[in-house]
Image (cartoon, rainbow, N blue to C red):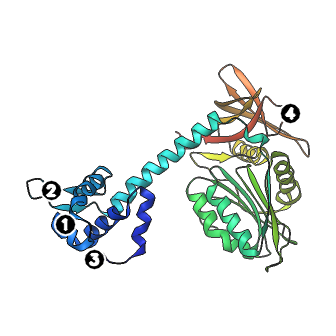
Amino acid sequence: MVMENDIFSGLSKFGLSPYEIRIYEVLVLKGPMSSTEVVKLTGIPQPRVYDLFNSLIKKGFIEESMGKKKIYKAIPVSQVLKREKDWLDSYSLNLQRYVENKKMYPDRYSTFLSLVEGYDGIIQKMQSMINEAENEIIISLSSHKFYDLKEYLQRASSRGVTVAVLVFTDEDVQFEGQAIVRTIHGKPTEMVISDRRSCIISVEAEKGNSEYALYFEEDNFIHVMSYYFNQSLWSVSRIVKNFYIAREIKFCNIWLTCDAIDFMFSRGIKLDAEVEGFYHDDRRTIKGEIIKTERIPFVRNTFYIKSGDKTYSVGGKTATLEDIKMINVKLHPSILQQ
């Protein structure tokens, strides 16, 4: 009889039936064997076993020997799961692209609001937002929440997400990896803005069941919170780690993008870029060279990109004056392309 171990039941997520899981488990744990041996160990009826072998071979979980007397061998777990992970990653990317191109409503009109209760619930929601971010995370935290989330932020940084962290503390802050890190004094205002598509703001800063937070996906709300973060917190904070140079740096918020551009320009760095956004309600990607920024405090943050013979002004996702309403941008500093 097969060893009782629930961990193998997870293989059902890969399309394996209970009988197929039994066969794979036996072959993984016991090694190559004949059909007769498999039948004895699994209790699967003999008439069924050959169809199951063929199914597992087609699915890439086992292989059979040549010759009349077949021996069946399990493909190593690491090899099977890597193949499935590679397929899932590719499928997920293609599905996301298809949905973005075919869905019947644009992101900028979506609205969602919910209440998150309790310290653990807020931390879990923030973790999820960090893990799901593809381009940019803007986050302000008390020191204890920062250390609760530090590992997740470092993982995001390692996969190429731009991380801008503001910690409410009087002490030094350590962060391994590339990130923009600042500190500030005062009572913590705790929030996360992920890819400028979702935001959570903690209403109470005390640890305990009374703490709760608002989570929302709505452009105008996110615009207000991003503006508050920039003007009331970020602009008056102390720099711990400034902008960095990488082959590709991704942003979603226009003010942080302009901060980065000004930082690069002050060091004589040429910037090529890919801007994704709305041009007269037509979603498109524009590639070119960034030539300047225009910034009016409390009013606008704009940069200009030259593509061919045309120069476009780029503003934030809710911009009204610029040519492009930016969704995200990828900066390519020329210093690393020589």
Q: Residue at x 8, y 53 (%)?
A: 67
> Of circles 4 and 3, which is in front?
3
* CA gap, disc 1 and disc 4: 67 Å
First-in-chain label (4 vs 3): 3
| Disc 1 element | loop
| Disc 2 element | loop
> Of circles 3 and 2, which is in front?
3
Task: Give above or below for 171 relative to 256.
Answer: below
| Residue, disc 1 | 32
**Answer yes or no: do the residues labelled 1 and 2 have beta carbons within 8 Å?**
yes
Q: Residue at x 82, y 31 (%)?
A: 322
First-in-chain label (4 vs 2): 2
* CA gap, disc 3 and disc 2: 24 Å
Q: Residue at x 25, y 57 (%)?
A: 53
Task: Give above or below for 106 relative to 111.
Answer: above
Labelled disc at residue 1: 3
| Residue, disc 2 | 65
* CA gap, disc 3 and disc 1: 17 Å
Task: Give above or below for 268 relative to 150.
Answer: above
| Residue, disc 4 | 320
Amino acid under disc 4: Thr
| Disc 4 element | loop
Res 202 quadrant in image: bottom right
Q: Position of residue 131 (x, y in %)?
A: 62, 59
Amino acid under disc 3: Met
Amino acid under disc 2: Ser
First-in-chain label (3 vs 2): 3
* CA gap, disc 4 and disc 3: 69 Å
Label 4 Cα neighbours within 10 Å, binned few <14 / some 14-19 / many ≥20? few
Asked whether 297 or 204 is in front, the reply is 204
